[in-house]
Image (cartoon, rainbow, N blue to C red):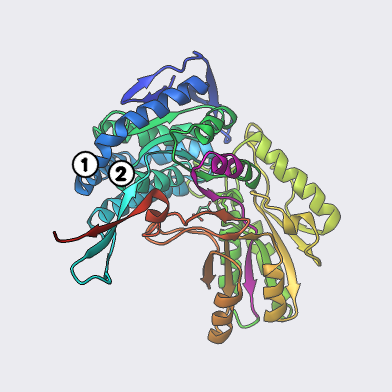
Amino acid sequence: MRYLNYINGEWVEPFSGSYNTNSSPIDGRELGEFPASSVEDAQRAIASAKGAFSLWKSLSYKQRASYLLAAAAILKDKVEEIGYDLTLEEGKTIAEGIGETQRAISILEFFAGESAQSIGSVIPSSNEKTLIYTKRIPLGPVGLITSWNFPIAIPVWKLAPALIYGNTVVMKSADLTPKSVYHVISAFHEAGIPPGVINCVFGSGRVIGTELVKNPDIKAISFTGSNKVGNGIKELAISTGKKVQLEMGGKNPLIVLADANIDKAVDLAIKGGFLSTGQKCTATSRVIIEEKIYDEFRTRLIEQTMSLKVGNPLEKDTFMGPCVSHSQQETVLSLIKAGKQEGLLLYGGETLQNPNLQQGFYIQPTIFEIDSQEARIAREEIFGPVIVLLKAKDYHEAIRFANDTEFGLSASLCTNNLSLAQEFIDEIEVGMVHVNSETTGAEPQVPFGGVKNSSYGPREQGKTAIEFYTQVKTIYVDQL
Ligand code: SIN
């Protein structure tokens, strides 16, 4: 099947007339053709978003919320079908594919609910007769550049706040996972969203993304993806006067102290490190274990990992599917190769040998042991099913290791010691802290984002999303 761009309320062919064939990382089957759009397509989408802005911002919050709720209801009716498509194009398990679609629905419902929340405050004036208040106003057309690892949740967590606060949108979906975004756009189309409020252009980031970042009619860019691309976007977007929000990499540590419940800690390491094939910005990639329990933890982790079913993610009992693409598989394998020279490979490290899976991009869940954080596998984001184990003398050494990274997205500590947990909450240099839970996960009603090189700009999601998608207007009202 051939899919089209969505511009000004219509499905339209790209100017180039060219399409890219999308295929599944599970077995290489073809999934459809998506536009290989050009700069002209992006410009047409931007003009459409610009044209729709004055109507959209003039609607009440309640009217705008009605489109979010209608789209959520449409997605709900198709949750199994969309979850299946997501798994086919991204490779995460079917339970994760359906779960992520449900999460997108919850995000839409949360931001529809924000339509009844405060958008400003009243501040006392030094003049007793003057009323001073602030209100949040939309920015204009915004560009949303989204990643392939959460191909429906991340587009929706940018789209929903952008729309509810009165902005119009040009969406650039990740090349590898266009069908998930297509489902979201179709749901809004079916919900009757006014033409031009949402526009979506499929194609290369280098072409479409660059135009969004450069074009003066786009007032803000929200991006999720790699640090390399994100830093390039930051420079260009700031030089054209835009607001910028970047969600990039992580090297998230899980610290396991000697008093922790070892079974629970092993479970957290496995889920955090290997679910979604480790392709989460919040994935657990370093496990730092207090030396008293190191050997026991390592043994149990390897035993549990050996029992995981890795393979076709459409089969219900599969724990872990393939990498998203051949190139991602190659990147992960090359870091594993480096790891074999720098550390001790405890488990995995190879592609799967099953003859039925040779058309897909599978890698075994992989565990390394290292004795120094200088190893590349301890410093670079891998974005694959690889975790490294590191022994620490005590909590203080563990937190030093944990903070020894350029990243600061998320971290977790396993302990029953409340005072050390509180110390950890204060000392760990990340945007999202967990105690006795996975490093992964993102509830829609709370802020998402990191510190150091993980993020830039205001937080996504929750009530804080308003910071990025609006600006403040201050109003003085006096009596004559
Ligand atoms: C991500 O890590 O990329 C998204 C948030 C999550 O579910 O962990």
State which quarter of the image contains the C terminus. bottom left
Which mark is on residue 166? 2
Q: Amino acid at mark 1?
A: Leu
Q: Secondary structure at mark 2?
A: loop
- Residue at 27% x, 41% y is 57
Name the foreground residue: 82 vs 204. 204
Name the foreground residue: 134 vs 77. 134
Position of residue 112 measured from the top left corner of the image (x, y, whole percent): 27, 50
Residue pointed to by mark 1 = 59
- Residue at 31% x, 26% y is 9
In this rendering, the answer to whether 427 lies above or below 75 is below
Horizontal side of 478 relative to 175 (left or right) equals left
- Residue at 81% x, 66% y is 372
Mark 1 is surrounded, within 10 Å at the Cα level, by few (under 14), some (14 to 19) or many (20 or more) other residues, namely: few
Q: Is residue 296 visible?
A: no
Mark 2 or 1, nearer chain start: 1
Distance from the alpha carbon under mark 2 to that under mark 1: 8 Å
State which quarter of the image contains the N terminus. top left
- Residue 40 belongs to the span the image colors magenta: no
Task: Check contact, mark 2 vs mark 1: CB within 8 A.
Answer: yes
In this rendering, the answer to whether 165 lies above or below 251 is above
Magenta stretch in the rendered image: 233-257
Position of residue 197 measured from the top left corner of the image (x, y, whole percent): 32, 34
Name the foreground residue: 130 vs 242. 130
Mark 2 is surrounded, within 10 Å at the Cα level, by few (under 14), some (14 to 19) or many (20 or more) other residues, namely: many
